[in-house]
Image (cartoon, rainbow, N blue to C red):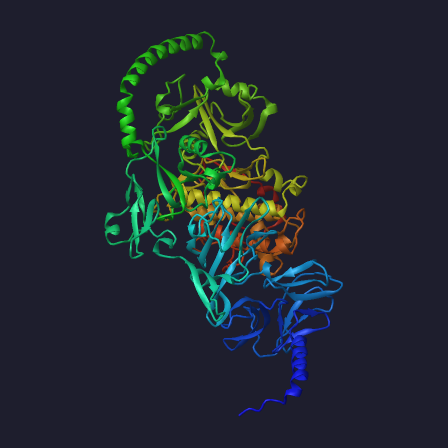
C-alpha cells in the first residue's frame, strides 16, 4: 500500500507542485525560447493545447482541446511535411520574421512564410484556439493559424475569400493520417456565392447561397439559439463564421472525408455528440436527380425524384431503372410572350454558379425582368428577411433542387403558359367577372380602332416625328414586311436557316441613323471584316454600339445571319447583350449594349493604358471569360463553339467586367458530336488551334486553345504573334513554355503590373492553366468546366502541361507577317507552325 507523506510535509509539497505546474503551463514562445519534444503551450484559459502529437508513425505539430478526454486535433501545421522522428523544434527565426518548424537535421519542414520584421516577437496560443505571431504586449498580429485552417472551423474562424485569399477546409486522409485528402470544402464566388464539398474537382454537396437567414440548403441554421451564424459578402470579401451563445458549449465544424459535420462536446467532456451532418440524405448529393428535377425524401430517407411540372424524363427507361442522371426536358417549349411561373415552396435554390443577382429590386420587378428575358428560367429573392428583397435570375437548366418539409424559401421557375396550373380561386374570379370583361372588350376594341387609325394617319404624315418608343418595336421577324428589296429573304421574313423562328427587337434605320449622327466618323469605334462599328445614343439616353454590314458587299452576310440567330438566344453576364437589329432595304445592322472601355486588346497591348488593369482585375477578367465560354459550351440553350475567341472580341464595361462578343462565325455544336470538320477555316491566326488551322477539325477544345492563348496574353500584355527580344526569337506560347520549363514563369508577367506573394499564387495558377489549354493535342486540353474549377480552386493540384501547339523558334524576319488578321470566306490549305 502506498504511504502518504506526513501531514507536516503536505503544505511544502503543495506549494512545490503548484509552482511546477505554473512553470510548465506557458502559452507563448519568445525569440529566446522554443518548443520541443513533450513540451506544450496551453492557452491562458486552459481550453486549448499546442504541441507535438503522433500519427501514422510520424510526428506533427498541432492544436487540440485540453479538457476533452478524446484527443481532438483542430489544426495541424505540417500536415503534408511530417517529422520522421521525435525531434521537432518550433521556434521564432533569429530576425523575428517567421515561425518555423525544424527537424533534427535543421531542415525547415514548415514556416509561416512571411516577413514580419517584429522588434519583440512572441508566438502565443489564444483562448480561441488561434495561434498567433505578434509584437509582444500589443494586438499587432503578423500571422495567425485562423488564416490557414486545416479541416476544422472553430468559433470566430472565417472561411471563404478574405484579404485576396481563399480559406478552405481540407479533410484528413484518414482517422490517423492528417495529410491533405481529395475532399475539400470551398467557396465558389461565381454568380451568387455558395460553398461546395468537393472530391477533387467533383461536386459532392453544396449548401446553397446565403439568403439572409441561413444557407438555402441548410434550414437547420434558422432560429438556432445555441449559435450565431455570420455571413459577410461585399466587393472585398465573402466569408462565413459562427459563434456560440453559451460559453459552456464547445463546438466545432469539421470536414470529415465526404461529409461536413458539426459536433458539440458532451457534458462529461469525454467525447463528442454529432449535432448535424451534410450531406444528410440522398437528396443532398449534388445533382442527385439530374437537371430540371425536384428531389424530396420519403419516410426512409430515400431520394424521391420527380420532374418539375411542365417537364418529362429525358429517358423514361432510365427513370424506370432509377437512373435519373439525365434529368428532365420540357414538354412544351417556351415562347417568351405567354409563359408563366410555378412556385416551389420550402426549396433549396438551384445551383447559382451562373446566375445574375441584383440586390436593389424586389420580387415583383424580379419577376418582370425574368418574364421579358426569354433566356430566364427561374427567379427568387436573394434575401428572405423582412418579407424578402433582392433578385436572383437563372438561365439554362435548373440543377440540384430539393424541397424540404419546412424551411428553405420560395423559388419560381418558368413554364409555358399552358402548363401553369389554374387554381380554383382563379376560375371563380374569371366566372364572376365574365360580364365585365365582355363589356370592357367591346369598348376597348372601339377605342383601339380609333387610336390605331389616328396613329397610322400621323405616321404616314410625318414618320420622322414618331417617338423612340413607337419606332423601336418588339416584334417577331415573321411579322416584318419587306421595306425594300433585300438580299436575304429568309432572314427578313424572320426564319433562321434551320427553321427556328427568331424574336428580336427591330429598329428603323432612321432611329439608328439619328442615334449615330448619321454614322459620323466621330462616332466610329472600329472596323473589321463584317463592316464598321459606330457609337450611338438613343432618344431615351441609352448608349449603343451599332455594327453595320457593308452595303454592297456579300462579305459578312452569312456572319450577320449567324450572329442574329445565335446571340438572340443567349443570355449571360459575360456575353455582350444584343439589343436588336435592323433589316431595312440594303441595310443590315446589329445593335449592342455599349461597352465603355471598348475591347480588351486596346488596354493590355497598349503600354500607356495597360497599367489600368492591375493583377486582381486581370484575374477577374480571366475568370469572367472562362465562365462565358463555359456557358456557350455547356449551359446555353445550344452548345456553341465561338471559333474566334481573341482579345479584340472581349469587350469591357464601365467596371472592366468582360463580355464576349462577335458570334459571326460561331457554330452550334450537337450534343452527341465529338468534333466536326470544315473546308472553310475561319478565325484569327495566333488563336486558332493546330488541328483546326491544319486540318479543319474543330470542337470545344478549339475554343479552349484560343482561351489559353488569351490567358497568356492577358498575363504578359504581349500578343501571341509578336516577336520577343530573346534568342532565339519565340512566339508567346513558346516563350511562356520556355520560362515554365526553366522555373521562371513569373517573368512572363506584364512589367506594368506590381505583384506580391499573395498574387503570385494566382499568377502561377493562371500560367499553368493557360499552358494546359494550349497543349498541342486536343485530347490533353481540359474542358472549360475543368478550367473554371482550376481557376477557382487555387490549392488543387494540376497535371504538368505538355508542349504547346506551334512550339518552335522563328526569325525576326517574320515580324512583318506576325500581325493578327481575321480570315473570312477563305480556305486555308497550309499553315506552317514555326
Please state which of residues 106 and 438 is positioned toward the viewer in this rendering: 438
* Image side of residue 296 versus residue 205, left or right: left
Picture residue at 39% right of the left edge, 18% below the top: 485
Viewer can see residue 508? no
The correct choice, above or below, for 110 with respect to 732 in the image is below
Q: Position of residue 196 (x, y in %)?
A: 46, 54
Vertical position of residue 50 compared to residue 196: above or below: below
Q: Determine which quarter of the picture holds residue 97.
A: bottom right
Q: How many marks?
A: 0
Residue 646 x %, y %: 53, 41
Report the residue that reaches farthest toward the front. Answer: 7
Horizontal side, residue 247 vs residue 206: left or right: right
Task: Determine whether, in the image, residue 388 is placed left or right of residue 496.
Answer: right
> Nearest the camera: 696 or 116?
116
Identify whether 128 is placed above or below 317: below
Q: Position of residue 705 (x, y in %)?
A: 49, 48
At 51% from the left edge and 48% from the top edge, which residue is drawn?
A: 189
The image position of residue 427, as x and y in percent, is 27, 28
Does residue 548 show up? Answer: yes
Amino acid at each position: 500500500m502506498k504511504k502518504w507523506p506526513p501531514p507536516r510535509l503536505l503544505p511544502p509539497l503543495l506549494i512545490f507542485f503548484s509552482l511546477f505546474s505554473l512553470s510548465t503551463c506557458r502559452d507563448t514562445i519568445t525569440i529566446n525560447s522554443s518548443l520541443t519534444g513533450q513540451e506544450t503551450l496551453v492557452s491562458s484559459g486552459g481550453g486549448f493545447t499546442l504541441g507535438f502529437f503522433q500519427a501514422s508513425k510520424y510526428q506533427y505539430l498541432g492544436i487540440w482541446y485540453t479538457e476533452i478526454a478524446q484527443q481532438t486535433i483542430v489544426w495541424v501545421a505540417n500536415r503534408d511535411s511530417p517529422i520522421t522522428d521525435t525531434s521537432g523544434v518550433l521556434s521564432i527565426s533569429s530576425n523575428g520574421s517567421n515561425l518555423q518548424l525544424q527537424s533534427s537535421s535543421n531542415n525547415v519542414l514548415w514556416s509561416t512564410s512571411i516577413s514580419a520584421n517584429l522588434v519583440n516577437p512572441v508566438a502565443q496560443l489564444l483562448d480561441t484556439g488561434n495561434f498567433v505571431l505578434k509584437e509582444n504586449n500589443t494586438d499587432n498580429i503578423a500571422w495567425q493559424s485562423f488564416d490557414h485552417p486545416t479541416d476544422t472551423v472553430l468559433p470566430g474562424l472565417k472561411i471563404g475569400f478574405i484579404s485576396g485569399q481563399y480559406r478552405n477546409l481540407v479533410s484528413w486522409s484518414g482517422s490517423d493520417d492528417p495529410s491533405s485528402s481529395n475532399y475539400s470544402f470551398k467557396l465558389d464566388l461565381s454568380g451568387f456565392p455558395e460553398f461546395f464539398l468537393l472530391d477533387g474537382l467533383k461536386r459532392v454537396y453544396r449548401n446553397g447561397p446565403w439568403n439572409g437567414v441561413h444557407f438555402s440548403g441548410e434550414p437547420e441554421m434558422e432560429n438556432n439559439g445555441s449559435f450565431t451564424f455570420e455571413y459577410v459578402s461585399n466587393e472585398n470579401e465573402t466569408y462565413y463564421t459562427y459563434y456560440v451563445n453559451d460559453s459552456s458549449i464547445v463546438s466545432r465544424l469539421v470536414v470529415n472525408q465526404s461529409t461536413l459535420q458539426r459536433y458539440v462536446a458532451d457534458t462529461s467532456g469525454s467525447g463528442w455528440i454529432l449535432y448535424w451532418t451534410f450531406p444528410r440524405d440522398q437528396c443532398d448529393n449534388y445533382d442527385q436527380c439530374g437537371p430540371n428535377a425536384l428531389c424530396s425524401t420519403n419516410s426512409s430517407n430515400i431520394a424521391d425524384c420527380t420532374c418539375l411540372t411542365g417537364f418529362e424524363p429525358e429517358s423514361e427507361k432510365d427513370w424506370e431503372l432509377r437512373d435519373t442522371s439525365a434529368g428532365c426536358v420540357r414538354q412544351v417549349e417556351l415562347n417568351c410572350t405567354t409563359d408563366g411561373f410555378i412556385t416551389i415552396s420550402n426549396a433549396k435554390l438551384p445551383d447559382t454558379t451562373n446566375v445574375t443577382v441584383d440586390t436593389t429590386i424586389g420580387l415583383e420587378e424580379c419577376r418582370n425582368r425574368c418574364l421579358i428575358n426569354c433566356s430566364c428560367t427561374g427567379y427568387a429573392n436573394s434575401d428572405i428577411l423582412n418579407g424578402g428583397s433582392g433578385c436572383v435570375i437563372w438561365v439554362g437548366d435548373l440543377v440540384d433542387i430539393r424541397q424540404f418539409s419546412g424551411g428553405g424559401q420560395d423559388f419560381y421557375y418558368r413554364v409555358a403558359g399552358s402548363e401553369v396550373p389554374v387554381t380554383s380561386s382563379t376560375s371563380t374570379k374569371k366566372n364572376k367577372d365574365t360580364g365585365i370583361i365582355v363589356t370592357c372588350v367591346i369598348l376597348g376594341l372601339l377605342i383601339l380602332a380609333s387610336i390605331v387609325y389616328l396613329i397610322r394617319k400621323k405616321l404616314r404624315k410625318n414618320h420622322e416625328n414618331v417617338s423612340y418608343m413607337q419606332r423601336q418595336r418588339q416584334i417577331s421577324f415573321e411579322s416584318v414586311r419587306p421595306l425594300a428589296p433585300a438580299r436575304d429573304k429568309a432572314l427578313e421574313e424572320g426564319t433562321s436557316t434551320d427553321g427556328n423562328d427568331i424574336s428580336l427587337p427591330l429598329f428603323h434605320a432612321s432611329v439608328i441613323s439619328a442615334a449615330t449622327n448619321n454614322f459620323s466618323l466621330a462616332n466610329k469605334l472600329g472596323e473589321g471584316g463584317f463592316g464598321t462599328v459606330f457609337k450611338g445614343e438613343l432618344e431615351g439616353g441609352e448608349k449603343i454600339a451599332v455594327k453595320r454590314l457593308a452595303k454592297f458587299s456579300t462579305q459578312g452576310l452569312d456572319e450577320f445571319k449567324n450572329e442574329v440567330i445565335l446571340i438572340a438566344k443567349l443570355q449571360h453576364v459575360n456575353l455582350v447583350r444584343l439589343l436588336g437589329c435592323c433589316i431595312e432595304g440594303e441595310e443590315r445592322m446589329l445593335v449592342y449594349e455599349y461597352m465603355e472601355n471598348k475591347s480588351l486588346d486596346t488596354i493590355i497591348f497598349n503600354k500607356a493604358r495597360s497599367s489600368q488593369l492591375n493583377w486582381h482585375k486581370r484575374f477577374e477578367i480571366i475568370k469572367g471569360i472562362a465562365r462565358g465560354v463555359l456557358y456557350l459550351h455547356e449551359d446555353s440553350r445550344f452548345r456553341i463553339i465561338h471559333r474566334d475567341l481573341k482579345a479584340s472580341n472581349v469587350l469591357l464595361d464601365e467596371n472592366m467586367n468582360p463580355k464576349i462578343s462577335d458570334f459571326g462565325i460561331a457554330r452550334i455544336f450537337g450534343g452527341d458530336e465529338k468534333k466536326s470538320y470544315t473546308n472553310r477555316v475561319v478565325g484569327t491566326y495566333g488563336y486558332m488551334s493546330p488541328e483546326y488551322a491544319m486540318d479543319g477539325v474543330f470542337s470545344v477544345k478549339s475554343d479552349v486553345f484560343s482561351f489559353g492563348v488569351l490567358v497568356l496574353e492577358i498575363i504578359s500584355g504581349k500578343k501571341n504573334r509578336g516577336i520577343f527580344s530573346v534568342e532565339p526569337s519565340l512566339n508567346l506560347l513558346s516563350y511562356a513554355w520556355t520560362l515554365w520549363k526553366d522555373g521562371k514563369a513569373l517573368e512572363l508577367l506584364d512589367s506594368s503590373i506590381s505583384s506580391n506573394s499573395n498574387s503570385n499564387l494566382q499568377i502561377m495558377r493562371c500560367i499553368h492553366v493557360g499552358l494546359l489549354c494550349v497543349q498541342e493535342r486536343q485530347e490533353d486540353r481540359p474542358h472549360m468546366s475543368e478550367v473554371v474549377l482550376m481557376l477557382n480552386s487555387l490549392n488543387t493540384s494540376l497535371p504538368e502541361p505538355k508542349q504547346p501547339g506551334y512550339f518552335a523558334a522563328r526569325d525576326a524576319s517574320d515580324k512583318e507577317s506576325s500581325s493578327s488578321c481575321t480570315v473570312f470566306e477563305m480556305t486555308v490549305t497550309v499553315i506552317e507552325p514555326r
